[in-house]
Amino acid sequence: MAGPWEKFAAAETEAATGDSGPWSKFQSTAAPARPAAAPLSRIDKVLKGVRDPIDAGAQLLTHILPEGVVNAGNRLNNYIADKTGLVARIPEGGVSDLVQGGSGVGGVDRMIADAEKAYQARRAAAGESGFDGYRTIGNMVSPANLAVASRLPAAATLAGRIGVGALGGGVSGALTPVAGGDFVDEKVKQIGAGALVGGAIPAITGGLARMVSPNASKNANLQLLRREGVQPTIGQALGGRANAVEEKLMSLPVVGDMVSKARGAANDQFQRAAINRALKPIGAELPEGMSGRDAVTFTENALKERYDDVLNKIGAIPADGKFTSNVAALRDKVNKMLIPADEKAKFQGALSDVLETFDEHGYMTSDAYKTLESALGADARKLAGSQSIYEGKLAPAVKQLQAELRDMLKRQAGEYADDLKASNTGWANFKRVQNAASKLGADDGNFTPAQFQNAVRALDKSKDKGAFARGSALGQDLGDAGKSVLGNKVPNSGTTDRALLNLGLLGGTAAVSPAAAMGALGGAAMYTSPAQRALVAAVSARPASAQQAAELLRKTAPYTLGASGQLGLGLLNQ
């Protein structure tokens, strides 16, 4: 006997075997599986990025404008959507806190949240997650972000570019849609993260630009020195802190000697460059290994010999009409000066020496010219240095008389005019070298760039040293370059810094540590001439295209700020 519960047991058995009796056809069936979301194409991702700032702008407006205005706009949008299908419907509801997955939010917030959820589902269908590169590209090329970038102010300094970048990045963060969470909180985070990324972009592109075209490669002074045959050390080439550290290295054992030697060689090469500027016009060059007073003497003799040779080729020099009229005008000018007659007689004496040098046919020999020209120069310098105010007033007149004599020679030089000009140019450059070599502290005639620059200024004869003030005095380009690149960059004695550097590099045990000794030897090897030449070339030798590429990097940085929003989201999601 089965008992009263047998029929229920039988029902369970039927269910287990799948035989549910006559009602089985009415049994509900499982819902069909939803099809997987279709993966996104690259174009889809880019277009999503292009649209992001536009959607974010619309979302911002719904949180800024009065709710009544927003709802009215939404109703108008939905009316157009229903009647024409040209626009998508906006979900019903007002503006409120946007909670991820919540159902009480409508309007643009819900539309953006739903669209983002669908977009991420399609990414997930393709196994994608995390950073969305193509969407970021879309952000950068979005017309909204490009319009912002085009209106950002240009900045000349890196700090300024970082500030502008932070501003642009913050705007990019503001133009990033909020797809979940409290709108205000999320927007503040987006703006902050965007500003952080935006500020980093100019720093990164600036670093890349310096790698492509280091500052040393754009240093006009460094390039001038290298063209003149001067090989600065790597510290001098880089300048700034690198140069200061290198100067302090000179107090270290072994490596310090090599640094000092390399810097001394650069100074010798600078002197050689200055001297060769005097010799180059006459086709000569300073012999290798010659320096100091020997180099000065060699240059002076070479220039005098060439000048004498040119004068001998020119031969006798006739007094032309221009010389005669100019000298007569100069004499009248002196006669009108309000100075005692006995002072005027000093000029008349110099003028008589000139006139008496011409023979009865109106010619002056080349030897007589050379003697007279030199004497007039000596007289002018003597008068200029006199304590008498009258003699000081006469000095320019005697100097002008010498200039008239020189101009006459130029007019009469004929086919040797170029040779004469070359000799005069060489002599003018030599006078700067001669003056520098005579300075106090120029041991054995070896001068520094600073001493050469002082000589350039001293020999600037323009009014109020105007040429030197403008940077156009003879030899000033070389002097400026030498003083800027080779000059001392440590503002103090550096005793404390050098002591700390010794302790830091040598660990206080260099005298007994083999490792420290090997390190010192390695550092010394870096300061051999071939090594320094290679290092300086590495930071200074760049084609013009490299500078153009570096500048392009800096200029395009603002147009990459549109990526700050997506990159900032990546930071927030870490």
Image (tube, rainbow, N blue to C red):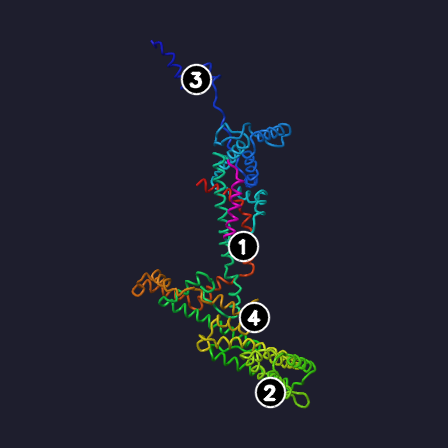
The answer to which quarter of the image holds residue 336 is bottom right
Q: Is residue 421 left or right of residue 235?
A: right
Where residue 320 appears, as percent x and y from the top left, is: 69, 83
First to last magenta residue range = 159-178
Mark 2, residue position: 367
Task: Tell us which disc is closer to us: 3 or 1.
Answer: 1
Q: Amino acid at mark 3?
A: Asp
Q: Earlier in the sequence, mark 1 or mark 4?
A: 1
Q: Is residue 167 above or below residue 402?
A: above
Task: Tell us which disc is closer to us: 2 or 4.
Answer: 4
Q: Amino acid at mark 2?
A: Asp
Where residue 497 appears, as percent x and y from the top left, is: 37, 62
Q: What's the distance in space between the residues labelled 3 and 1, CA to CA?
A: 85 Å
Q: What's the distance in space between the residues labelled 3 and 4, CA to CA?
A: 116 Å
Q: Residues within 10 Å of mark 1 (few under 14, many from 20)?
A: few
Q: What's the distance in space between the residues labelled 2 and 1, CA to CA?
A: 60 Å
Q: What's the distance in space between the residues labelled 2 and 4, CA to CA?
A: 34 Å
Q: What's the distance in space between the residues labelled 3 and 2, CA to CA?
A: 139 Å
The residue located at (49%, 64%) in the rendering is 537
Residue 452 is marked as none
Q: Amino acid at mark 4?
A: Lys
Q: Residues within 10 Å of mark 2 (few under 14, many from 20)?
A: few
